[in-house]
Image (tube, rainbow, N blue to C red):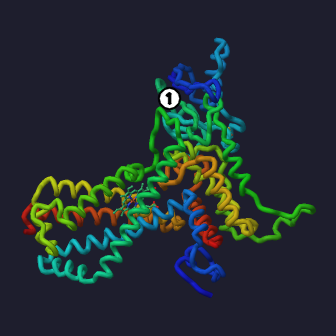
Amino acid sequence: MKLTLHVWRQKSPGDRGRMARYEVQANPHMSFLEMLDVLNEELLAKGEDPIAFDHDCREGICGSCGFMINGVAHGPNKATTVCQLHMRHYRDGDVLYLEPWRARAFPVIKDLVVDRCAFDRIIAAGGYISAATGSAPDGNAVPVPKDTADASMDAAACIGCGACVAACPNASASLFTGAKITHLGVLPQGQPERYDRALRMVAQAQQELFGSCTNIGECEAVCPKEIKLEVIARMNRDFIKASWLRRK
Amino acid sequence: MTSSLFGLLYTEKFHPHPEGPFMSPAAAAQFYAAPIGKKVIVAVTGFILFGFVLGHLLGNLQVYAGPDKINAYAEFLHHNLGLLWGARLVLLASVALHITASLQLNALNNRARPVGYQRREAVESSYASRTMIWSGPIIGAFVVYHLLHFTFGAVHPDFKDLNPYHNMVAGFRQLPVSLAYVVAMVLLGQHLYHGAWSMFQTLGVSHPRYTPLLKRFAAVAAALLVAGNISIPISILLGMVS
Ligand code: HEM
Ligand code: FES
């Protein structure tokens, strides 16, 4: 199948950037990234600069990949990262627009690659529990009810790809931050730092200049790991309660 | 153990705090400085305004019971000065806070994406939810007009103090005026179609079973508000109320 791609090309963070048009021959068995690999081989053969995009596992588990396809983060398939999107979902003659995640907190490094260190700094601000080091504690020393473990695991499925920020009209990191706060905050091991964590991670997200949530749900719709808006409500609840506990 | 609504919502056990039941000004300022703090203000004031527009509708619908009924209701409100001014002050403060906080958040959100997309597609969000920043200010402008029209009588063709029945009938016989009210009510319906469940999410109330019900509640409440309010100018224009 023949596809027409309009791809954001930007040489460096300081470059103004522009859309460039390419044509590529793909087959339905390729993944989306393999289709780009084919295009890049052709570009290299012509002595042109290949299109830069982030990727690592190509199994939908690492969170490296991701860009906008026709205005939707990770493309049209539900619960699918772009590395797991296959060309059989497209038809001969399709025209696709590829753009990087857009947010002030995610500056473009090159082409479709953006700097997501802001997420790392949010994690560093509170995405941990304190545990005594030394001899490893017994695995089941702290009993965790099944539904608590499930709620935590559902939130922990977040791979930090940034699609939620990219899809949000406000470039808000609420789904990501809420997932991280929920993942630890529901567990017994996460209780001692629960309210500090909420205050710190929310403050860090604000410092990174992400926007604020308007509860419209675009993030939930594009999340490859199907993180639910409930994690945002929980973040709000923990933030409100933490502020209240510190009311003096 | 003391309990309160706050305690029920936000804690498993509510411990009386040595600091007492209020936030210090410094803590309140810190809370408001955070986007979530501002959004909580939007939600709480939105909740108050939502309650008001529902109550206001019930008051208005008395027009169908005839002039005596609704005029007596107006008398009642205006002879309870404490009630009247208490409600007016709370509403005025709510409107001021609602607008200030939502505009500040909107400015923050606009700054969060300096370079936009060339292609953009909405997957899940409703039209109403994406246009809150348009429906809101238009409702605000309408409220000013509405006060000049029916409260102060400044832009009314034949205003009679404490005679809302006459004022409505005379006011709504003007077609452009009725149309403006209809448009404003549709926008209020949109605002609340999103807002009346969003405020719960903002305050941290969310549950896989109850959130869909809240969304339905918001849709029904918004539809009833629009239908109820719009019915009045329409009945008057059709001569069913005169
Ligand atoms: C009768 C008048 C009004 C009522 C009943 C009302 C009600 C509400 C409610 C319930 C919310 C949801 C709060 C939340 O999501 O946490 C809201 C949000 C909002 N309102 Fe209003 N509002 C009114 C007037 C206005 C006005 C005059 C403005 C003008 C600026 C405005 C702008 C907004 C904005 C920007 C939001 C935030 C939307 C979002 O986050 O998605 N509203 N309103
Ligand atoms: S490359 Fe790892 S999730 Fe796509």
Position of residue B119 relative to residue A2, above or below, is below
| Quarter of the image with the C terminus of chain B in it | bottom left
Q: Write down the chain letter for disc 1.
A: A
The residue depicted at 55 percent of the width and 56 percent of the height is B35
The residue depicted at 54 percent of the width and 82 percent of the height is B4
Q: Quadrant of residue B162?
A: bottom left
View quadrant of ligand 2: top right
Residue A160 showing in the rendered view? yes
Residue that numbered label 1 is attached to: A96
Position of residue B87 relative to residue A236, above or below, is below
Secondary structure under the numbered disc 1 in the rendered image: strand
* Foreground residue among A12 and A112: A12
Q: Amino acid at mark 1?
A: Leu
Apparent side of residue B224 relative to residue B149 in the rendered image (left or right): right
| Quarter of the image with the N terminus of chain B in it | bottom right
Q: Residue furthest bottom?
A: B1
Apparent side of residue B65 relative to residue A72 in the rendered image (left or right): left
The residue depicted at 41 percent of the width and 58 percent of the height is B99
The answer to whether mark 1 is within 8 Å of ligand 2 is no
Residue B185 showing in the rendered view? no
Count the numbered circles shown.
1
Q: Residues within 10 Å of mark 1 (few under 14, many from 20)?
A: many
> In the image, residue A199 lies at what x, y percent?
65, 61
> In the image, residue B56 lies at what x, y percent?
28, 71
> In the image, residue B170 lies at what x, y percent?
10, 64
> In the image, residue A160 lies at what x, y percent?
66, 47
Apparent side of residue A93 relative to residue A120 in the rendered image (left or right): left
Apparent side of residue A185 relative to residue B179 in the rendered image (left or right): right
Q: Quadrant of residue A52?
A: top right
